[in-house]
Amino acid sequence: MAIEKTFSIIKPNAMKKNAIGDIISMFEANGLKIAAAKLTILSKAKAEEFYAEHKARPFFGELVSFMTSGPVLLMCLAGENAVAKNREIMGATDPKKANVGTIRAKFGDNMGENAVHGSDSPTSAERELSLFFEKSEICNL
Ligand code: CMP
Protein backbone atom coordinates (compact mmCIF):
# COMPACT_ATOMS: atom_id res chain seq x y z
CA MET A 1 0.00 0.00 0.00
CA ALA A 2 1.13 3.56 -0.75
CA ILE A 3 2.70 5.64 1.99
CA GLU A 4 0.40 8.48 3.05
CA LYS A 5 1.40 11.72 4.80
CA THR A 6 -0.51 13.64 7.43
CA PHE A 7 0.01 16.78 9.49
CA SER A 8 0.31 16.72 13.27
CA ILE A 9 0.71 19.39 15.96
CA ILE A 10 1.72 18.78 19.55
CA LYS A 11 -0.19 21.65 21.19
CA PRO A 12 1.08 24.02 23.92
CA ASN A 13 -0.54 22.14 26.84
CA ALA A 14 1.14 18.83 25.88
CA MET A 15 4.45 20.67 25.32
CA LYS A 16 4.19 22.07 28.89
CA LYS A 17 3.74 18.50 30.16
CA ASN A 18 7.07 17.46 28.57
CA ALA A 19 5.16 14.90 26.53
CA ILE A 20 6.96 15.13 23.15
CA GLY A 21 8.83 11.86 23.71
CA ASP A 22 5.76 9.94 24.91
CA ILE A 23 3.64 11.18 22.00
CA ILE A 24 6.25 10.46 19.33
CA SER A 25 6.77 6.99 20.85
CA MET A 26 3.06 6.33 20.36
CA PHE A 27 3.29 7.34 16.68
CA GLU A 28 6.39 5.16 16.15
CA ALA A 29 4.93 2.19 18.02
CA ASN A 30 1.99 2.33 15.61
CA GLY A 31 4.07 2.37 12.44
CA LEU A 32 4.16 6.12 11.72
CA LYS A 33 7.47 7.84 10.96
CA ILE A 34 8.41 11.51 11.45
CA ALA A 35 9.08 12.82 7.93
CA ALA A 36 9.47 16.49 9.00
CA ALA A 37 9.41 18.40 12.28
CA LYS A 38 9.58 22.05 13.41
CA LEU A 39 9.44 23.40 16.94
CA THR A 40 8.04 26.95 16.86
CA ILE A 41 5.60 29.46 18.34
CA LEU A 42 2.74 30.17 15.94
CA SER A 43 1.96 33.77 15.02
CA LYS A 44 -1.66 34.92 15.45
CA ALA A 45 -1.95 35.32 11.66
CA LYS A 46 -0.71 31.79 10.98
CA ALA A 47 -2.98 30.23 13.63
CA GLU A 48 -5.97 32.14 12.19
CA GLU A 49 -5.11 30.98 8.69
CA PHE A 50 -4.66 27.38 9.84
CA TYR A 51 -8.03 27.31 11.65
CA ALA A 52 -9.86 29.50 9.06
CA GLU A 53 -12.70 26.96 8.69
CA HIS A 54 -13.61 27.59 12.36
CA LYS A 55 -13.60 31.41 12.07
CA ALA A 56 -17.35 31.75 12.72
CA ARG A 57 -17.36 29.36 15.72
CA PRO A 58 -17.70 30.83 19.23
CA PHE A 59 -14.48 29.16 20.37
CA PHE A 60 -12.31 30.58 17.54
CA GLY A 61 -10.72 33.43 19.57
CA GLU A 62 -9.93 31.14 22.48
CA LEU A 63 -8.50 28.49 20.13
CA VAL A 64 -6.15 30.97 18.42
CA SER A 65 -5.09 32.46 21.74
CA PHE A 66 -4.30 28.98 23.15
CA MET A 67 -2.45 27.84 20.02
CA THR A 68 -0.19 30.93 20.14
CA SER A 69 0.37 30.73 23.92
CA GLY A 70 3.59 28.69 23.77
CA PRO A 71 5.77 26.41 21.67
CA VAL A 72 4.23 23.75 19.45
CA LEU A 73 5.81 20.87 17.54
CA LEU A 74 4.68 20.75 13.89
CA MET A 75 5.19 17.40 12.16
CA CYS A 76 4.64 15.47 9.00
CA LEU A 77 3.83 11.85 9.85
CA ALA A 78 4.23 9.21 7.15
CA GLY A 79 3.02 5.63 6.89
CA GLU A 80 0.30 3.36 5.58
CA ASN A 81 -3.12 4.98 6.19
CA ALA A 82 -1.35 7.77 8.09
CA VAL A 83 -4.39 10.09 8.25
CA ALA A 84 -6.76 7.52 9.75
CA LYS A 85 -4.07 5.88 11.88
CA ASN A 86 -3.07 9.20 13.42
CA ARG A 87 -6.70 10.00 14.26
CA GLU A 88 -7.04 6.61 15.95
CA ILE A 89 -3.88 7.16 18.00
CA MET A 90 -5.05 10.69 18.96
CA GLY A 91 -8.55 9.66 20.09
CA ALA A 92 -11.74 11.76 20.04
CA THR A 93 -11.52 15.58 19.92
CA ASP A 94 -12.99 15.79 23.42
CA PRO A 95 -10.46 14.13 25.78
CA LYS A 96 -13.34 13.02 28.03
CA LYS A 97 -14.67 10.91 25.13
CA ALA A 98 -11.29 9.66 23.90
CA ASN A 99 -10.60 5.93 24.27
CA VAL A 100 -8.28 4.87 27.09
CA GLY A 101 -4.66 4.76 25.91
CA THR A 102 -5.05 7.44 23.22
CA ILE A 103 -2.97 10.64 23.24
CA ARG A 104 -5.93 12.88 24.07
CA ALA A 105 -7.08 10.62 26.92
CA LYS A 106 -3.54 10.72 28.36
CA PHE A 107 -2.53 14.34 27.76
CA GLY A 108 -5.67 16.33 26.82
CA ASP A 109 -7.28 18.71 29.32
CA ASN A 110 -10.48 19.77 27.53
CA MET A 111 -11.94 20.29 24.02
CA GLY A 112 -9.70 23.27 23.30
CA GLU A 113 -6.57 22.05 25.06
CA ASN A 114 -6.71 18.56 23.59
CA ALA A 115 -2.94 17.93 23.30
CA VAL A 116 -2.68 17.23 19.56
CA HIS A 117 -4.08 18.13 16.16
CA GLY A 118 -4.22 15.75 13.22
CA SER A 119 -5.51 16.28 9.67
CA ASP A 120 -9.03 14.94 9.10
CA SER A 121 -8.51 13.86 5.46
CA PRO A 122 -5.74 13.51 2.85
CA THR A 123 -6.95 16.79 1.27
CA SER A 124 -6.68 18.64 4.60
CA ALA A 125 -3.28 17.04 5.17
CA GLU A 126 -2.00 18.47 1.91
CA ARG A 127 -3.31 21.97 2.69
CA GLU A 128 -2.03 21.92 6.27
CA LEU A 129 1.41 20.54 5.39
CA SER A 130 1.83 23.21 2.70
CA LEU A 131 1.08 25.94 5.27
CA PHE A 132 4.05 24.96 7.41
CA PHE A 133 6.55 23.01 5.30
CA GLU A 134 8.26 23.49 1.96
CA LYS A 135 8.10 20.29 -0.14
CA SER A 136 11.90 20.07 0.17
CA GLU A 137 11.63 19.95 3.99
CA ILE A 138 9.61 16.71 3.96
CA CYS A 139 11.71 13.55 3.75
CA ASN A 140 10.66 10.65 1.56
CA LEU A 141 11.20 7.73 3.91
P1 CMP B 1 -8.19 20.28 16.33
O1 CMP B 1 -8.04 18.88 15.92
O2 CMP B 1 -6.96 21.10 16.48
O3 CMP B 1 -9.18 21.02 15.28
C1 CMP B 1 -10.00 22.11 15.65
C2 CMP B 1 -9.94 22.41 17.11
O4 CMP B 1 -10.98 23.23 17.60
C3 CMP B 1 -10.12 21.10 17.85
O5 CMP B 1 -8.97 20.30 17.72
C4 CMP B 1 -10.40 21.59 19.26
O6 CMP B 1 -9.21 21.87 19.97
C5 CMP B 1 -11.13 22.90 18.98
N1 CMP B 1 -12.56 22.76 19.28
C6 CMP B 1 -13.46 22.04 18.56
N2 CMP B 1 -14.68 22.14 19.13
C7 CMP B 1 -14.53 22.93 20.22
C8 CMP B 1 -15.42 23.41 21.22
N3 CMP B 1 -16.72 23.08 21.19
N4 CMP B 1 -14.93 24.21 22.19
C9 CMP B 1 -13.61 24.54 22.20
N5 CMP B 1 -12.72 24.11 21.28
C10 CMP B 1 -13.17 23.33 20.30
Image: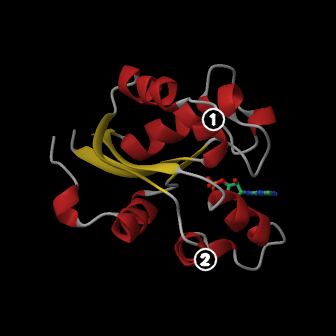
Quadrant, the N terminus = top left
- Residue 95: x and y in percent read 75, 36
Please, is residue 95 above or below residue 4 in the view? above
**Picture coordinates of residue 25 (x, y %)?**
42, 23
Give the crowd class for mark 2: few <14, some 14-19, many >=20 residues within 10 Å.
few
Q: Which mark is residue 91?
A: 1
Q: Observer-nearest residue: 19 or 98? A: 19
Residue type at tag 1: Gly
90, above or below 130, in the image: above
Residue drawn 47% across the image and 57% down it? 121
On screen, residue 109 versus residue 107, left or right, reads right
Name the quarter showing ligand 1. bottom right
Q: Which mark is residue 69?
A: none
Q: Is residue 114 left or right of residue 37?
A: right
- Res 135 quadrant in image: bottom left
**How far apart in space, not on screen, are marks 2 and 1 (Cα)?**
23 Å
Residue beneath disc 2: 52
Horizontal arrangement in the rendering, residue 74 relative to residue 53 (left or right): left
User: Is residue 53 rendered to the left or right of residue 89?
Assistant: right
Q: Quick one: SS at disc 1? A: loop
Which residue is at a point 77% across and 48% down the rendered structure image? 111
Is ligand 1 less than 8 Å from the beta carbon at label 1? no
Q: Nearer the viewer, residue 102 or 115?
A: 115
Which percent across, then down, holds residue 120? 52, 55
Quadrant of the image containing the C terminus: top left
Q: Secondary structure at mark 2?
A: helix
Hey, what amino acid is under mark 2? Ala
User: Where residue 45 sits in the image (x, y, percent)?
Assistant: 56, 78
Mark before the other along the chain sequence, 2 or 1:
2
Query: Few, some or many C-alpha atoms within 10 Å of disc 1 (few <14, some 14-19, many ≥20)?
Result: many
Query: Residue lying farthest right?
Result: 58
